Amino acid sequence: MSLIQVINPNTSLAMTETMGTAARAVAAPGTEILAVCPTHGVESIEGHFDEAIAAIGVLEQVKRGKEQGVSGHIIACFGDPGLLAARELASGPVIGIAEAAMHTATLVATRFSIVTTLPRTLVIARHLLQQYGFTHHCAALHAIDLPVLALEDGSGVAQEKVRQRCMQAKREDGSGAIVLGCGGMATLAQDLTKELGMPVIDGVSAAVKMVESLVALGFGTSKHGDLDYPREKPLSGAFQHLN
Ligand SMILES: NC(=O)NC1=NC(=O)NC1=O
């Protein structure tokens, strides 16, 4: 049995549940999913400031997951906040949903589109495309121009806007796959894939299978080089609990 920690970096309990549902839908029989979120921080992540705040919560949850003996960790926000810091802290693999979805898209299509939430988060996706080496694989980026928590308001408006933008991307972008650019979109991928007749990829599900694969291969985060554990030094004040 392996235990995979799905960390929603924002503090929305509803969105945490959404991600847990998506993760459990694809988890192998021997995999248990532990969906968590920080006890304090920001309710949704919609820019650089939110990402910085959320990264501390990610590190707190990675530390807790280690203490609970999880096999690996998933950072379930499309900005992959705190990814490299989390990898220093972790023993097991740490996968961000943006990198998971982007890698998966490049395995099934030569070019992919991204559909995300607010226009101001597009630059974060662009930075990740550059960081991960996928800029030339991404045909276009779209934003539904709704806040992240609109995905949890129960109206279905955000979900329909995601559907419309995915259909537009299929018509206009010349891409073979679509990446859903928000952890809160995780449960939309299967139905959209069926309706559009092309891969619509959710990073939470993709990351679960990647963590399972790495664990099965016996690979944790490399501790040779820059992702070795942080150098021992006392953390003070509000960060003491991270020692
Ligand atoms: N681009 C995004 O919508 N990023 C996100 N903000 C969140 O709070 N969760 C996400 O996945």
Image (cartoon, helix red, strand yellow):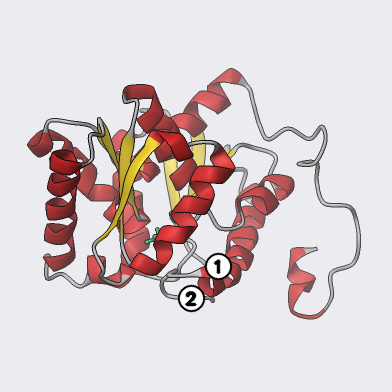
Q: Is mark 1 within 8 Å of ligand 1?
A: yes
**Quarter of the image that includes the C terminus:** bottom right
Q: Are marks 2 and 1 in contact (CB under 8 Å)?
A: yes
**Residue 61 x/y as whole percent:** 59, 59
The local crowd at label 1, few if under 14, some if 14 to 19, many if 20 or more residues have their Cα within 10 Å, is many
Figure quadrant of residue 90: top right
Residue 1 in view (yes/no):
no
Q: Residue at 82%, 36% (x, y): give it.
A: 225
The tag earlier along the polypeptide, 2 or 1, is 2
Residue 82 in the figure: left or right of residue 140: right
Q: Residue at 40%, 39% (x, y): give it.
A: 101
The residue identified by callout 2 is: 42
Residue nearest the observer in this picture, 11 or 44: 44
**Residue 125 x/y as whole percent:** 45, 53
Figure quadrant of residue 190: top left
Q: Residue at 58%, 72% (x, y): give it.
A: 53
Q: Residue furthest bottom?
A: 237
Q: Amino acid at mark 2?
A: Val
Q: Secondary structure at mark 2?
A: loop
Looking at the rendering, the quadrant in which ligand 1 lies is bottom left
Q: Amino acid at mark 1?
A: Ala
State whether residue 89 is above or below residue 242.
Answer: above
